[in-house]
Image (tube, helix red, strand yellow):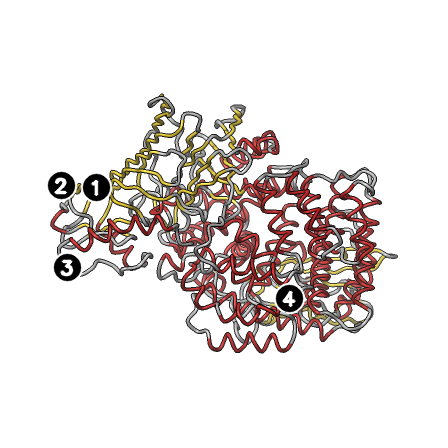
Amino acid sequence: MLPLAIATALAFASATAALAAAPAAAAAPRAENAFLSQADAAARAARVSNVDYVLDFTLTGKETFNAVTTLTFDLKDKDSALTVDLDKATIKSLTVNGKTVTPRYNGWFITLAAADLAKGRNTVVVAFERLHSTNGEGLHRMVDPVDGRVYTYSHFEPAAAHQMFALFDQPDLKATYQLNVTAPADWHVISTKRETGAVASGADARRWTFPATKKLSPYNFSMHAGPYTMWEDKSGKYPMRLFARQSVASQIKPAEWFKYTKSGLAFFDEYFGIPYQFEKYDQILVPDFLYGAMENAGAITFAERGFMYKADMTAEQRQRLAAVIMHEMAHQWFGDLVTMQWWNGLWLNESFASFMGTLATAEATEFKDAWRSFYSEGKQQAYAQDQRSTTHPIEVPVPSTQNAFDNIDAITYSKGASTLMQLRHLLGADVFRKGVHNYLVKYQYRNARLDDFIGSLGQAAGRDMKGWTQQWLYQPGVNTIAANYRCAGGKITSFALDQSASKEFPTLREQRVQVAAFRLDGDQLKLDRKVAVTYKNASTAVPGMVGAACPDLVYPNYEDWGFVKVQLDQRSFDSARARIKGVDDPLLRAMLWQSLWDGVRDGKLPLNDFIATALDNAPGEKDYTLLGDVLGKVVASKHYLDLMRLDGPYSAQATRDLENMAWQGAVASKGDDNFQRRWFGTYVAVASSRPALDRLAALLNGKGTIDGLTVNQDLRWAIVARLNRFDYPGAAALLDAEQARDKSDSGQAAAIAATVARPDPALKAEWLGTIQDVKTKLPFSKVRTAMGSLYPAEQAALAERSAEQRLARLPELDKSAGPVFMRSYGPSLIPASCTPASVQRLQAAAGSMQDLSAGTRRALLDTLQEDRRCVTIKGAMTAK
């Protein structure tokens, strides 16, 4: 987390003085640092039970808040001291079992002396004051730049509830929470339960009271307060509300939110066989959010930047909204109702929600191709992550809360979800569903471990799951399968699936897939035969394929049942390149496109060949979802070209060809807003020649048009950013004018992104200094925006000016800035320039910087591997 303001240091003074005055204590019950170890959490959970909180907050909108926590619990013994978590607060009073005591407080947790505790029921009352957080954790505060109104919201995952109140901040000490809040009179207060009262409290405040919740882990409880605009819908089984800041309310389409929420609740009620447990369903759009969304029980938060647009949503944006609503909704059962015992189980929460969220989107909304979107996006990220040297098993140890998010990535979300998907194919959909239902019934309002979940599935299936669990959940890496077949007389005479693994991660796995063979019929590749097969060894015979016509293309993971990388045989690879537009099935087309792109990233298919294939085929793609996938690869191709800085004429010509393709696509899509905006977004992303930038400038100032396209505020900012990135004449003035036009929080962020992207050495140095200043007053959301835009791919010379400094300062920043900061800083600002010298520099850093935190070291090693990959792709180019 980011260090707080100087006022916090002053607040520590009283706590430090109290600590100095306190009598010497016995051996400390845990390490004196900001984190809770798994061992210490387990020891505390063994002694503590039946936890209840009464929380009383006074919110004024100012930078600090006051609160009182009344904590009651049963204690098994009073043999030793006990700790209560509370972060960076000024403690005003501490009462233990009716006795006022001097706080023994280190800024991270309070230590309660054994002599003050009782065997059996205990009551602890902590009154304190604390600064609001500004980094997205704890009780975050934001001042709206448009109207000056103040908004607050809580975020506690993985273990940040102690940044808001005093508690046992660990998932296996579930508790009830009874909340009282005094807040300005025009504010709403939203929490897990619906309020029982909100009455006047003085001239300018109201006192909100909420009934006690059901048993929840601390990170699932929440409180959000501010002058939010509210929409309400009572048409479904459960009352629904939606909240957003007043200044952005016009951008919200509540009907869309309520439609997907209502259909999702009905779907999950039926699928799980357990009704939704939290009585009402609130969703809150919040600013400066660190992540996409958070599954707080009954009061889900969403990042504004991901779900708020200044034009009607495209189909892609609506699908993303539906998918994230469903993901967080699945957590209400799997995560909130049944919760992992410790943070090593967080992957299962996220994997299951990703799997169930996609299933619900496909079956309960209009987006029936949701699994195709999952394949093209999340699953490809998981494949990429699982081929890195830093990959990890799905289930990993988490020694302390410091490590809770070290392994929260595409393995956690998408490989885990894919693993569950193929497990459903292996066991059968009905058996899988039965196992999930039994698990939720058995462990509701309790904590559970991986063995509990897998055991429930195994019991439903009547099979031992130990071998499968070891292969899939405790071993890293992705396998590759290839079809090994022979033909004679126009028929397949032998057919086997060959499975391989890397030397580093040699595990072979059991999995059920479909093998499909295709024959050319004119210009079309037609399905000739498909066979389902369960394989587990290096080679598995597929007798069902023998006798089929000798194929023009074989795809050994047809319909994407498995989590496995596909290696096409040479005949199939050549057919895919030549005939991809002749494949009727859009999922198969997507998978063939991915095989080609894998060839590029593995250095086996020249990037220029891939670009030529895209130029030939993308304009004719009529499937909206697949077009987005292909155009995403086009933009990635342009990114590689920019990184490579080729000496010959090819790069400039390829850029012009890509620009022209995207422009013509936008022009030709008149009348279809979804396709037109998709093509135009690609045009903005690849435009870098002077004629292309001239076109963008003309669209911005109204001197040019694309028939049918509305250049809305979001597109205006995208154009302004692109023009500034390439130092187009007058771009800085255009930025100033756009800032004057759009004074919103999102406008401020867009202005920062456009500003820092300018190829100005002095400006780069100034912004890098701001980013690296851990005491900067700039909100972290703005700092993070600057990180991601500071060094575009084509600005390698400018990036090199600070490359040595950025690398040298990495260990220092890693220690001082904290994990929230470094999760953004590392991937954005560790220098890489797609040259052998850059690779060598990163290798040297990886060799010498052995003491980095786990997350930062991973970012360093990942950057090194991707830099090597870029050099390999450059070396495989056949046109320069």
**Whole-percent x, y for residue 243 in the image:** 51, 32
Looking at the image, residue 861 sits to the left or right of residue 817; the answer is right
Quarter-wise, where is residue 31 in the image? Answer: bottom left
Question: Is 774 or 443 nearer to us in this picture?
Answer: 774
Can you tell which mark lies on residue 26?
3
Residue bearing the label numbered 2: 99
Q: Earlier in the sequence, mark 4 or mark 3?
A: 3
Q: CA distance from mark 2 to mark 1?
A: 11 Å
The amino acid sitting under disc 4 is Leu
Q: Nearer the viewer, mark 4 or mark 1?
A: 4
Disc 3: CA contacts within 10 A as few (<14), some (14-19) or many (>=20): few
Q: Position of residue 108 (x, y in %)?
A: 30, 53
Q: Are marks 2 and 1 in contact (CB under 8 Å)?
A: no
Q: CA distance from mark 4 to mark 1?
A: 54 Å
Identify residue for label 1: 93
Q: Secondary structure at mark 3?
A: loop
Element under disc 2: strand
Q: How far is the residue under mark 2 from the one under mark 4?
A: 63 Å
Asked if residue 459 lies left or right of residue 564, the reply is: left
Q: In the visual, does 714 lie left or right of 264?
A: right
